[in-house]
Amino acid sequence: MKAVLTRVSEASVTVDGDVVGAINCAETGGILALVGVGREDDEEAWQKMARKIAELRILDGEKSVEDVNAPVLLVSQFTLLGRTAKGRRPSWGDAAPGEVAEPIIAKIASALRERGIHVEEGRFGANMQVQSVNEGPFTVLVET
C-alpha cells in the first residue's frame, strides 16, 4: 500500500460537477490522503496505513491529525502503484482490482472515524477532480 499525504488548508473532490468530499481547515490544517491499494495488501497493511494517517506528526508544529483533531480527505488512487521502470506506459499490475481495493479504502476511512477523526472521501472508481491548497508545501510518501 502506498499513500501520498499532503498537508492542506483546504481540499475537495468533485465528480460530475458535484462536490462529493471537502475539508476546510485553515486553523488546524488537514491531510489530503491519496491512497493506492496493492494486490498483496492485507489487514495489517490497511491498519498500519490508517495509523500512519492519524499519527504521523506532519502538521504544523509537528502535530498529528489526532493531536489537533484535523480532518482528512481520503481519495483512492490506484495509479500510485504504477511501475514506470520500462517503456513509456505505466504498468498497473501491482494495483489491487477495484473489488478488492474499494473495501480496503472503506476500512481505512472507518478506522480513522473510530479514532474520532472527521473523514471526507472521494468516490471510488469515478473520474474525480481533486483540488487542494497545500501548506508548506509539505508532502510525504508512505508505504506499508
Image (cartoon, grey):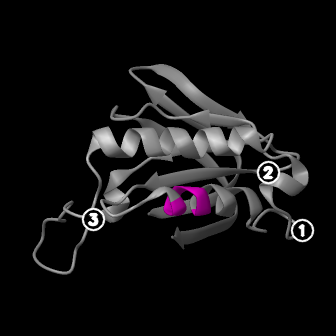
Span of residues in magenta: 44-48
Q: Residue at x 89, y 68 (%)?
A: 61
Residue type at mark 3 is: Gly
Q: CA distance from mark 1 to mark 3?
A: 33 Å
Q: Earlier in the sequence, mark 3 or mark 2?
A: 2
Q: Check the image and report above or below for 110 versus 8.
A: above
Residue 104 screen position, x and y as percent: 46, 45
What residue is rendered at 88% in x and 46% in y? 27
> Where is residue 140 shown, x and y percent of the image?
59, 70
Q: Choose mark 1 or mark 3, whichever is in front.
A: 3
Residue 63 or 13: which is nearer the viewer?
63
Instruction: Give residue 82's mark.
Output: 3
SS category of the residue bearing label 3: loop
Residue furthest to the bottom:
85
- Percent position (x, y) of residue 18? 49, 18
* Quarter of the figure with residue 88: bottom left
Q: Is residue 46 magenta?
A: yes
Query: What residue is drawn where x is 89% and y is 56%?
Result: 67
